[in-house]
């Protein structure tokens, strides 16, 4: 077969903030130097945490399957519930990775002052949920 397969590659566009830094050559490395023992400790903790979270997700899926079996739900309903759980877990993981800043919240009132900053009652702009937020000095 003398045909050659053509490879098409797609890449996601860079976020605007990173693209500007690359164009103006003001992009500094995110990687900071640190001691090897400190890095090793961090990575061990990080991997341990990831494995623990994975096991917890698996446990929740097993628990749901067990409860659906006890409730004698039809197979189509079981599949639907498992898909729903997977989507919910995915949304939660995406939310955990989301970076937050002060602009995402609107200050309702200041609650008090601490040794390192002030505590405020804030409302999230996107979904109007209320939180207590500690602003550091």
Image (spheres, rainbow, N blue to C red):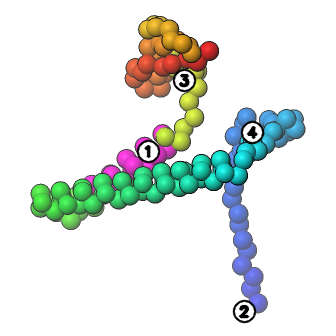
Which class describes the residues within 10 Å of circle 3: few (<14), some (14-19), or many (20+)?
A: few
In the rendered structure, are the residues bearing label 1 and label 2 in contact, judged by CB atoms less than 8 Å apart? no
- In the image shown, does 66 or 126 lie closer to the viewer? 66
Numbered badge on residue 79 = none
Please name the residue that numbered disc 3 is placed on.
104
Q: CA distance from mark 2 to mark 3?
A: 57 Å
Please name the residue that numbered disc 1 is placed on.
91
- In the image shown, does 87 or 76 lie closer to the viewer? 87
- In the image shown, does 95 or 113 lie closer to the viewer? 113
Q: CA distance from mark 1 to mark 2?
A: 46 Å
Please name the residue that numbered disc 4 is placed on.
18
Q: Is residue 87 above or below residue 137?
A: below
Residue found at x 46% / y 46%: 93
Question: Where are the magenta residues, as a range?
Answer: 80-95
Which quadrant is the N terminus positioned in? Answer: bottom right
In the rendered structure, are the residues bearing label 4 and label 1 in contact, judged by CB atoms less than 8 Å apart? no
Residue found at x 42% / y 52%: 53
Please name the residue that numbered disc 2 is placed on.
1
Q: Is residue 117 visible?
A: yes
Q: CA distance from mark 4 to mark 2?
A: 44 Å
């Amino acid at each position: 077969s003398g045909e050659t397969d053509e490879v098409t590659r797609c890449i996601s566009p860079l976020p605007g903030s990173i693209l500007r830094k690359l164009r103006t050559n003001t992009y500094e490395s995110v990687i900071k130097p640190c001691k090897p023992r400190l890095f090793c400790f961090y990575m061990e903790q990080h991997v341990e945490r990831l494995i623990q979270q994975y096991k917890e997700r698996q446990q929740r899926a097993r628990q749901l399957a067990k409860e659906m079996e006890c409730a004698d739900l039809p197979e189509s309903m079981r599949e639907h519930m498992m898909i729903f759980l997977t989507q919910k877990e995915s949304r939660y993981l995406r939310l955990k990775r989301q970076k937050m800043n002060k602009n995402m919240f609107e200050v309702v009132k200041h609650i008090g002052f601490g040794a390192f900053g002030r505590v405020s009652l804030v409302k999230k702009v996107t979904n109007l949920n209320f939180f207590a937020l500690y602003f550091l000095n």
